[in-house]
Image (spheres, coloured by chain):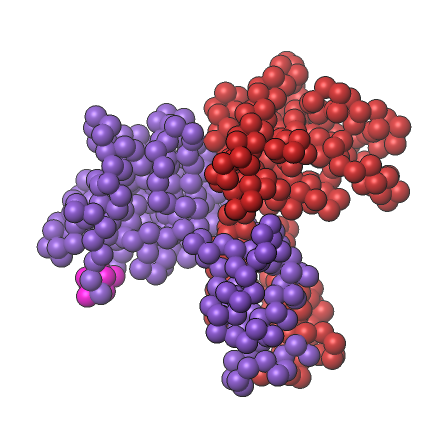
Chain colours: A red, B purple
Amino acid sequence: VAGRATGPPGRSVANKLFTVLDAFSAGNPQLSLNEMAQRAGLPLSTTYRLATELVEWGGLERGPGPGYRVGQRLWELGALALCGSTVHTLALPYMFDLYEATHENVHLAVLDGREALYVQKVSGRRSIPVRSRLAGRLPLHATGVGRVLLAHAPPQLLDDLLERGLERFTAHTVVAPKHLRRVLSDVRRTGVAYARDELTLGTTTVAAPVFDALDSVVAALGVVVRSSASDARRLAPAVRCATISISRQLRASAVTGVGSSGDGSAQWNAT
Amino acid sequence: VAGRATGPPGRSVANKLFTVLDAFSAGNPQLSLNEMAQRAGLPLSTTYRLATELVEWGGLERGPGPGYRVGQRLWELGALALCGSTVHTLALPYMFDLYEATHENVHLAVLDGREALYVQKVSGRRSIPVRSRLAGRLPLHATGVGRVLLAHAPPQLLDDLLERGLERFTAHTVVAPKHLRRVLSDVRRTGVAYARDELTLGTTTVAAPVFDALDSVVAALGVVVRSSASDARRLAPAVRCATISISRQLRASAVTGVGSSGDGSAQWNAT
């Protein structure tokens, strides 16, 4: 019934609904009806009808202000995505250990498309503020975890990124293809990636790869510290220690099936 | 277009889509097409069409097995729900502190309907396994955080729960109305709630309320320990210390607007 009289033919109701939801982002967590309609490219009446249905279901919520925001039902549903993520679940305790040892930001990212997607994050009151956000995305070439993922991705991904052009975030961002290739080669050789002042001035990331039972890199674990800290490199053994532990747990879970969603796969969209 | 010829009139496409998504739960994170159709009460063809659109969007994913599961796009969207949650964001660092001091399970719950909804959870490798799950729900009467929330909820909620009857999970679960009322009165008087062996034999929760700037209880923070631990009561000062800190942060954020979604509200669907 709601499938009729809403816009041009060829675009399904489901598709319109997704477009309404896609209007929300970390930068725009709250939207007015007008903003939703505009961002979704839908008539106000259609948007209103879909928003009302979404609110009834719990996928959107009103206010606190005049607008709409993502609702609790979507949060609950979204949390189920992690049931299939072995690496996500197994990594967390080791991330807490690493946080406890360093009191710095600790995050776990997976490769998603052409970006690093942050799937876990631990940070305390004394940790330096960072740009990474849970469920947020950051570029591969300018972050520690991104470099780990890029270094172990199929070479076409790097070619693709280079063709599109690398964004320069600070004067220190490595954007020269040759330079980046050398950096990535170092990452593969040493097992550790650094990114110093490349995304944000004043912060340095130390990151290392997490391997699954088939020795594929399924995630990258990173610690973010102040660049002014005496030597970020001193954290490399701690980060590697944590990733080695997580990788061993992944191998064990692949054998026993513990913590996996059935087939022992540690992959979580890390493709 | 997808809005036509799918089932009886009166039920919108959006509604059908929600029903398909609602088929997934923590107990059933992966479903075959048949299971989805059955649980959603929809014809196989409709379910297939909706599932296909959901997969294209990223709301569902195929496999690893033969079935479908909640996809990354829903996880990303769901994470936006937390942008509006001041208590959720402000509490986390204090939860890490409490974890570091105790190495036990630390969780934060809000009242949602007639249940406690777990919105944050920290636990390590040495913490005792617990039933609480991020984005999971547990009963109010038999959990520490639930009792905190129930003790500070409008009295009609307790009446409502008593009328429906309280589930007995173990021989220790308090289900007698008079007994429960006395327990809740103690919670209000002492500022601490305990639940020993009431949901699961062998685990004890110590919980305390988090107050917002208007002195309303917006969340409950709990630590779960082995019941065999010498005295769970020794943890009460630590739990209260953390909740007092979080409450102070909430008041500060209400004044400055820091960390709030604009109006300083610390409420996150805690109704």
| Residue A130 visible at all | no
The segment highlighted magenta reads B156-163
**Residue B250 pos. (x, y %):** 41, 43
A255 and A243: which one is in front?
Answer: A255
Q: In this view, which residue lies farthest toward the left? A: B178
Looking at the image, which residue is at 37% across and 25% down? B101
Q: Left or right: B209 with respect to A110?
A: left
Seen in the picture, residue A12 relative to A251 is either above or below; the reply is below
B237 and B57: which one is in front?
Answer: B57
**Residue A160 pos. (x, y %):** 85, 43
B218 and B148: which one is in front?
Answer: B148
A206 and A212: which one is in front?
Answer: A212
Looking at the image, which residue is at 32% across and 49% down? B217
| Residue A77 visible at all | yes
**Residue A60 pos. (x, y %):** 52, 63
Seen in the picture, residue B110 relative to A200 is either above or below; the reply is below
Looking at the image, which residue is at 23% across and 50% down? B169
Q: In this view, which residue lies farthest toward the bottom? A: B9
**Residue A269 pos. (x, y %):** 65, 46
Q: Residue A167 lies in what quarter of the image? A: top right
Judged by its main secondary structure, the magenta piece is: helix
Seen in the picture, residue B47 relative to A73 is either above or below; the reply is below
Q: Which quadrant: the C terminus of chain B?
A: bottom left
Q: Residue A265 lies in what quarter of the image? A: top right
Q: Is residue A25 magenta?
A: no
Total of numbered circles in the picture? 0
Q: Which quadrant: the N terminus of chain B?
A: bottom right
Q: Residue B255 lies in what quarter of the image? A: top left
